[in-house]
Image (tube, rainbow, N blue to C red):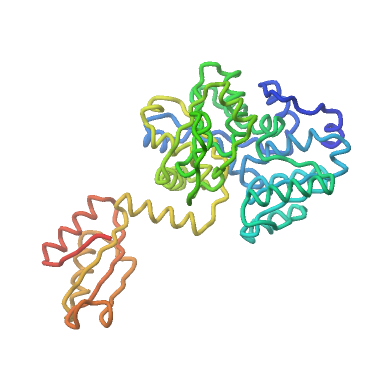
């Protein structure tokens, strides 16, 4: 059914409008989930803004990329459909193209870098795609994908520099503003720029007075640098790997520049805080890129105070170990976990006395490292490391004061 309709569609225009976004919404209906937009009271209280979350982490592949992939695949010509599609991705775009090509009965090839985690390769293959592992970087994988597309006559489906993809991504803002028309501000993550370009196009025509911000992380602020006319310099580790892009799309860049959008650059710590706050406060699992919109609200509170802010939680594909690490790091920063270090005399009862002082004030010791043989400075002393769970920073400070009152020299780690 979708294939028959696709053959009747004209190729997407080089300019994207609200009409294109609405057409994309009709085209992908039933193939892509219309995800809920919810107002989160907890996040609203924390930030001083009225926070609305667009939960695209609930898509079948866990990310918004399905919108653009589904729309662009539906727009393929009969010849392109017969030849098949090829894409380059190490993550969400790969699974989106694989899924919607499979639904449309089209052969798909996905080129992924050799370092791609096995789970992502397996999931992509699970949608029926042929996966080719090539290159050490995304750039090398992209070059190989383009080479394969020429040699095998495959249609190269770009993750963001394509008007059909941009129109599809814009359906996220279309749905969000239809479901929560009170939204007056959007904070949209930026990688290659397709999501921001599509969402801004929809928002500016649907609600001309709305403010739309793009959001990048410090290590990869390519769009902000391009808009400022600076040479692009990016790189470094980030939990927001989904928006860790060096080369932004030329069409998204042109649309974003024409609309005069500001792109906010947030620190890595704000992204981690946003991931933890979404998990604990909103009960929503978000990857780093999916939490970037909330990170902007946390990092630039003066821009969002009193506003009704729409945030696309554009992906939830975060590694379980990374999520665990982020949550634990945030507990330490909030003072709800204490790492305490002692050098104590090697005498019976010392550990029991320390544990009692902690428990008397309601602390919970969850980890103990007691080194008597090789770590201590002398044979008459013991090195002790404790991890203690507390309600808040005030309780933690009271516990440390009680330990010091007992003549223990304690250091926080």
Quadrant (top left/top right/bottom left/bottom right) for the C terminus: bottom left
Could you tell whether 281 is left or right of 398 in the image? right
Work out whether 409 lies above or below 374: above
Q: Residue 240: x and y, percent? A: 51, 46
The residue drawn where x is 88% and y is 36% is: 78
Dividing the picture into quadrants, the one containing residue 5 is top right
Q: Closer to the camera, 78 or 314?
A: 78
Q: Residue 352: x and y, percent? A: 21, 74
The residue drawn where x is 61% and y is 32% is: 172
Could you tell whether 63 is left or right of 150 in the image? left
The residue drawn where x is 76% and y is 42% is: 156
Q: Residue 337: x and y, percent? A: 32, 57
Work out whether 318 lies above or below 262: below
Could you tell whether 257 is left or right of 280 in the image? right
Dividing the picture into quadrants, the one containing residue 173 is top right
Could you tell whether 76 is left or right of 259 in the image? right
Q: Residue 187: x and y, percent? A: 50, 31
The residue drawn where x is 38% and y is 54% is: 329
């Amino acid at each position: 059914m979708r294939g028959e309709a696709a053959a009747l569609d004209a190729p997407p225009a080089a300019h994207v409008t609200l009409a294109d976004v609405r057409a994309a919404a009709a085209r992908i209906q039933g193939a892509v989930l219309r995800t809920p937009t919810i107002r989160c009271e907890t996040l609203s209280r924390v930030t001083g803004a009225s926070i609305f979350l667009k939960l695209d982490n609930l898509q079948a592949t866990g990310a918004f990329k399905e919108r653009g992939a589904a729309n662009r695949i539906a727009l393929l010509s009969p010849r392109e459909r017969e030849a098949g599609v090829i894409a380059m991705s190490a993550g969400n775009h790969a699974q989106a193209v694989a899924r919607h090509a499979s639904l449309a009965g089209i052969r798909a090839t996905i080129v992924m870098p050799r370092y791609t985690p096995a789970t992502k390769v397996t999931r992509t293959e699970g949608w029926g795609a042929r996966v080719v592992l090539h290159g050490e970087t995304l750039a090398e994988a992209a070059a190989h994908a383009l080479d394969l597309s020429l040699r095998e006559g495959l249609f190269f489906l770009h993750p963001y520099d394509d008007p059909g993809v941009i129109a599809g991504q814009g359906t996220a803002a279309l749905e969000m503003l239809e479901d929560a028309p009170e939204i007056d501000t959007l904070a949209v993550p930026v990688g290659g720029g397709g999501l921001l370009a599509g969402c801004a196009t929809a928002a500016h025509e649907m609600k001309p007075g709305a403010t739309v911000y793009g959001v990048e992380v410090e290590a990869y602020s390519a769009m902000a640098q391009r808009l400022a006319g600076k040479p692009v310099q990016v790189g470094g580790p980030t939990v927001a790997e989904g928006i860790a892009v060096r080369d932004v799309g030329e069409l998204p860049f042109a649309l974003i520049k024409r609309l005069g959008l500001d792109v906010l650059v947030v620190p890595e710590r704000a992204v981690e805080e946003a991931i933890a706050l979404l998990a604990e406060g909103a009960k929503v699992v978000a990857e780093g890129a999916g939490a970037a919109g909330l990170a902007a609200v946390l990092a630039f509170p003066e821009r969002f105070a009193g506003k009704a802010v729409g945030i696309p939680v554009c992906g939830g594909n975060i590694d379980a170990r990374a999520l665990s690490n982020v949550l634990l790091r945030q507990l330490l920063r909030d003072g709800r976990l204490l790492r305490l270090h002692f050098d104590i005399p090697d005498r019976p009862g010392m550990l029991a006395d320390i544990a009692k002082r902690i428990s008397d004030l309601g602390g919970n010791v969850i980890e103990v490292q007691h080194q008597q043989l090789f770590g201590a400075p002398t044979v008459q002393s013991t090195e002790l490391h404790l991890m203690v769970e507390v309600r808040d920073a005030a309780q933690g400070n009271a516990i440390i004061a009680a330990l010091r009152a007992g003549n223990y020299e304690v250091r926080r780690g």
